[in-house]
Structure formats: structure tokens, C-alpha cells
Image (cartoon, rainbow, N blue to C red):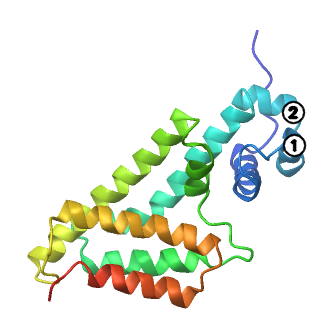
């Protein structure tokens, strides 16, 4: 017996679910809110995603993939200091574009669920590993080009930048001004070099 084909656009439904989870968090989001936002029936959610939790993990993975797109230029083989600067400029812009500011769905989810949920913790760790790898490569190139004089290893500097990126998301959600977030980025980048 063949199941009925999906009668909804998965991409649009996921985007709607992301908006709800992002605004409310996992625990505070009801199936009723998801059904209304996604414009599909409860059974369609269960059929496509297995459960509210399955939908949440799929939405979080989709969101994380979109976040990693912002990081793509930093991860290129020829990336250097300018790509890092551009990434942080774009990050501050995206984190402060909406009002109220929702922060970063992934970071919000980690702070809400990491102590209770291994899968969310692992998604967060995968994202941070990829971010750190991208920063490490770009930093090595920046050092080789003479753009920065390192005060520590590229890996340590990459962790510093990853922490800065996460901190920006938390501060933006808390209402810190765009000007102050840019100042934090300038300080983080200045700390990379003793020059």
C-alpha cells in the first residue's frame, strides 16, 4: 500500500515552523501554534516528521544549514581576514534586522535544551566545529599573508571568534545596540594581532 503524497510544500512548512520555534522555543511551542503557522493538519506533521520533536529537529537542522551559508565565504580555501570581517559585519546586520530581535534559533535552542537533549547539543557542537574550522583556515591564510601577527595559535583564535559569534547572538537578543555589537567585533578582531 502506497501512502498519500504530501499535499504541502515542505520548505514553506519548515520555514513557518522555524519562525514559531525561534520565537517561542521548543517547550513553549504548541502543536496548535505549529498547525496554524504551517497551514497543515496535525496528522500531516506526524506523517512527515513523526512528532513535534521530530519537526523541531528537522527545523533546527534546516536553520543551521542556512546559518552555515553565511559562513561559506570564510570556509573557502582562499579566505582570509577580509572574509572574517565581512562575516561579522553580515552577522551583526542579520542579528539586528528584526524587532523584536529573536537572536539565533540554534543558540536559543542550546541554551533552552542542551542540558536535557543530546541531539540538540550535538547539532550545536557540529555547527561550532564547522565554524571553528572555517575560521582556522581563514586565519592561517591571514597569517601567511601578513594581515595579522598572531598572539596564539590559529585554532585558539578560531575558538575566540566562534565565542564572539555566539556572544553576539545572545547580546543581540538582549537588545544590545548594533553600534555596541560592532564595537565588540572590532575588539575581538583587534585581539587577534599584536601588531
What residue sits right under mark 2 in the picture?
42
Q: Is residue 34 left or right of residue 112?
A: right
Which corner quadrant of the image does residue 157 belong to? bottom left
What residue sits right under mark 1 in the picture?
35
Front-most of 20 and 69?
20
Dot 2 and dot 1 residues touching (CB under 8 Å): yes
- Where residue 180 sits: x, y (%)? 52, 87
Image vertical order of residue 38 relative to residue 71, above or below:
above
- Where residue 154 sits: x, y (%)? 18, 65
Report whether residue 141 is seen: yes
Question: In the rendering, which numbered label is found on residue 141?
Answer: none
- Where residue 57 sits: x, y (%)? 61, 39
Which corner quadrant of the image does residue 58 belong to? top right
- Where residue 83 sits: x, y (%)? 32, 76
| Numbered disc 2: secondary structure | helix
Residue occupying image coordinates x 83% and y 45%: 34
Q: Residue furthest top?
A: 1
Front-most of 186 and 116?
116
Which corner quadrant of the image does residue 55 belong to? top right
Of labels 2 and 1, earlier in sequence is: 1
Amino acid at each position: 500500500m502506497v501512502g498519500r503524497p504530501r499535499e504541502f510544500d515542505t520548505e514553506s512548512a519548515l520555514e513557518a515552523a522555524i519562525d514559531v520555534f525561534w520565537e517561542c522555543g521548543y517547550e513553549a511551542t504548541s502543536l496548535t501554534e505549529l498547525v496554524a503557522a504551517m497551514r497543515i493538519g496535525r496528522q500531516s506533521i506526524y506523517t512527515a516528521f513523526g512528532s513535534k520533536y521530530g519537526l523541531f529537529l528537522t527545523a533546527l537542522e534546516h536553520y543551521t544549514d542556512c546559518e552555515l551559508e553565511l559562513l561559506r565565504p570564510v570556509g573557502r580555501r582562499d579566505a582570509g581576514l577580509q572574509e572574517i570581517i565581512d562575516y561579522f559585519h553580515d552577522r551583526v546586520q542579520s542579528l539586528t534586522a528584526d524587532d523584536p530581535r529573536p537572536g539565533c534559533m540554534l543558540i536559543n535552542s542550546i541554551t533552552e535544551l542542551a542540558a536535557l537533549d543530546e541531539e540538540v547539543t550535538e547539532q550545536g557542537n557540529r555547527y561550532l566545529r564547522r565554524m571553528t574550522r572555517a575560521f582556522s583556515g581563514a586565519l592561517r591564510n591571514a597569517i601567511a599573508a601578513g594581515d595579522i601577527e598572531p598572539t596564539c595559535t590559529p585554532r585558539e583564535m578560531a575558538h575566540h571568534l566562534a565565542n564572539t559569534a555566539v556572544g553576539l547572538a545572545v547580546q543581540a537578543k538582549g537588545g544590545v545596540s548594533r553600534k555596541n555589537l560592532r564595537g565588540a567585533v572590532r575588539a575581538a578582531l583587534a585581539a587577534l594581532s599584536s601588531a
